[in-house]
Amino acid sequence: DEYERPHIDPLTGAISRRYPLGTGAAFSCIVTAEGQIKNLEIIEASGFPKYDRAVLRAVQQLSGTQILRFPKGSHRRNIMQPGRIKTATSNSFRYHHFGDVEKI
């Protein structure tokens, strides 16, 4: 397991960054109608192998969860799903919305 505890600065209490702002890795996978993730791979590396492996682990952990459920009435057997996971590009808070749209 490659989990590393974050480093906390004892003077400020701030968590130091492991990777520069804007670090990202792109991946591709197939999501089946049963909610399984297949053929998961990094298609654009971040330059930080541990970050890339963390992206793969995070995506793989979604396999079998409700978030990958296809809409009721869907006729798709599987979908090719590319994506990118990126660290924040600034220190400010932002809300991100993720979703898939299928016209049935």
Image: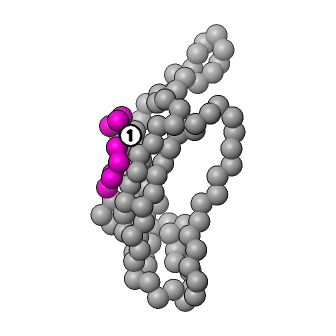
The tally of labels here is 1
Q: Mark 1, residues whose alpha carbon is within 10 Å: few (<14), some, or many (≥20)?
A: some
Q: Nearer the viewer, residue 45 or 29?
A: 45
Q: Which residue is mark 1?
A: 46
Q: Where 12 falls versus 90 (above or below)?
A: above
- Of the 4 image quadrants, the one containing the N terminus is top left
Q: Is residue 31 visible?
A: yes
Residue 2: x and y, percent?
Answer: 36, 36
Q: Where 42 falls versus 48 (above or below)?
A: below
Q: Nearer the viewer, residue 91 or 51?
A: 91
- Of the 4 image quadrants, the one containing the C terminus is bottom right
Residue 64 magenta-drawn? Answer: no
What is the span of residues highlighted in magenta in the rendered image?
Answer: 41-50
Residue 14 as seen in the image, left or right of residue 17? right
Q: Is residue 53 visible?
A: no
- Find numbered disc 1 in the image and state the secondary structure of the residue it sits on: loop
Q: Where 78 falls versus 7 (above or below)?
A: below
Residue 98's quadrant in the figure? bottom right
Residue 18: x and y, percent?
Answer: 47, 28
Q: Nearer the viewer, residue 1 or 53?
A: 53
Residue 22 as seen in the image, left or right of residue 59? right
Say which residue appears at 50% left-offset and 44% top-offset.
Answer: 86
Q: Where 65 falls versus 5 (above or below)?
A: below
Residue 49 magenta-drawn? Answer: yes
